[in-house]
Amino acid sequence: MQINENTCVQIFYKMMKSRLFEELCVQLKDLNIISDKLYLSYGQEAVAASVCALGFDDMIFASHRSSAIAISANVSAEKLFAEAMGLNSGLNSGRCGLSQICDKNVNFISDVIPANSFAKAVGAALALKIKQKNNAVICYAGDGAAMTGDFFEALNLSALKKLPIVFYIENNGYAQKSPQSDYSCVKDISQIAKGLNITGILTDGNSPIDVYTATLQALEFAKQTSSPVIVEAKTYRLSGHFYDEIQNYRSEKEMEKWLEYDPIENHTNFMLKNKMGEVEDFINMRSKIKEELDIALDNVLNTLSDPNSEELQEAQA
Amino acid sequence: MSISSYAKAINSVIASEMLKDENIIVMGQDVTSGGQYSQTEGLYKKFGTRRVIDTSINDDTTIKTALGSAMAGLKPIVFINSVFLLKTMDSIANEVAYTDFVYNSRYPSSMVICVDIAPSKANPPQMNFMYEAMFAHIPAIEVVYPSGVNEASSLMKEAIHSDKPVIFLMDKKLLLSEEDNFIAELNYQIGKAQILKEGDFATILSYGFMVKQALIAANKAQKLKLECEIIDLCSLRPLDKETIINSVKKTGRVIIAHEGYKTMGIGAELSALISESEAFDYLQRPIIRVAANDTPVGFSDELYDKCIPDWKNIYEAILYTAK
């Protein structure tokens, strides 16, 4: 499939914005400005950028590791920063932090409990079908969540009732600290689709083009045939399960291997090779995104130092 | 007034509400074939496979699916078997109850979860579900426990119209029993208790099956000129504090009667509520709880009767508090 330049730029923009957003979050965490645990998607940005394939009014369900997906889905970075700081001006008024957020403007709903989004997403797909809308639901979850009974039950129900839903398994190889071989009898989770007689697609989660193509194909199939699809994107979490986790469970060699297979670098090389831009263009784009995020963050930080701000008054009360 | 049963009354309320609002759907095991108590009889024929949806026995997933459909604009009524109710604790406590708070009221979570609960004879222990207190413990949901056909009918309508998720507890022993005093157009409210009999000697607080047992005991006590005030709580969350406190201030004696377990039960909450209120100063005698013994409920009649209280235990409590 030919992917146009505009889409490629979009994918780059989303991945870079996700990464820079999380880098800023880490800096804020180190400065004790944010208290959020930060379930980061460092290295998994290509999967988050798959939202480029969504149609208008499709619904997104996600897990605790969802800030990159939220950023990719155009949720306001300013509101996300504020949420991470637990401010009233945050996306959810500081009720849950970044691990459980929603934004009705872009139909984005995440849930902190792994696997609990599956059945809720099935219910949303059921509502779309009953209301005869030509939309689909996409439900992102990790490989750990895919080994729960909840996943099987959601798959069974959505296949039985013929619901337009894409179960997107972001397989980063680890459930918290446990490697996949410790808790899963299958290597490719997309294989589970066979037993349920539904479609399963396996894709390289660090190749943004493959991810985009697979997602588009899955969404089109789900909508056209009104049936569930499993997409499994193999990727790697370069950060810990949460930001300051003690990472004693994997080798540096393993991490280095994946650092060299970085999705943003892969995509940049792809675009350069296909003459979709010069090196300078990417540097400029990065600076522009950084600037956008800095402004968003400054806006939030300014409310903290503004003597009239609601936040400061609350803190002093 | 006419003859009806709890199940029939619920059925006709759901059918008429479904006619008025096309977003209402019914989900659960066996709902297309009418359910174990015919509570969904005929709905499938009237509203078809789009709105009356059979699910398997994975009730936790059923409730989460219903929640997702509510968030996307539908109004689900879910029927759950009490055997699986504890498996749904995650979906009810973690998801349904928290949705409004965690998503800042941006997504609706209004739904009705109907469960046939309570002990009944000739059941293995796990089928005698007496954990209503666990559900009443959860913030941000409403829990109703109707004691008869009129309460069931009126509260079901209220539950369907409530903005909040409602757990609709149906006593197995009451579901099929017919009553001849059915009035379709009563207006009970969630959170409002009903004073079924006025009296000034003692307040008897009860709900579900035990309400009628309390009435039997109170009628016997009346012969001894002990006039008891019977309050049917109707909803366990929220509790009608005002009605309870006013009654206790009048009588000064309290008996709490339920089939649920005593320790950490609804009675404990009611007792604490009274102790913390201005009614405490009016108490003339200690509060008495008539409740199930803290043991599993056995299959045989003998084991069942050892554990589950009835009107006789309430009557003894009245006599005790009169001493």
Image (cartoon, rainbow, N blue to C red):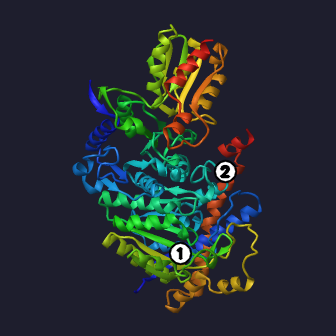
Name the foreground residue: B293 vs A55: B293
User: Left or right of A96: which side holds A53?
Assistant: left
Name the foreground residue: A204 vs A309: A204
Picture quarter with the N terminus of chain B: top left
**Residue B21: quarter of image:** top left
Name the foreground residue: B126 vs B98: B126
Residue A303's disc number: 2
Q: Classify A291 as above or below A93.
A: below
The residue most toward the bottom is A273
Mark closer to the chain start, 2 or 1 = 1
**Residue B105 pos. (x, y %):** 50, 46
User: Left or right of B128: which side holds A299?
Assistant: right
Crowding at mark 2 (Cα within 10 Å: few <14, some 14-19, many 20+) = some
Amino acid type of the residue tagged 1 in the rendering: Val
**Mark 2 residue element:** helix
Q: Which residue is mark 1?
A: A47
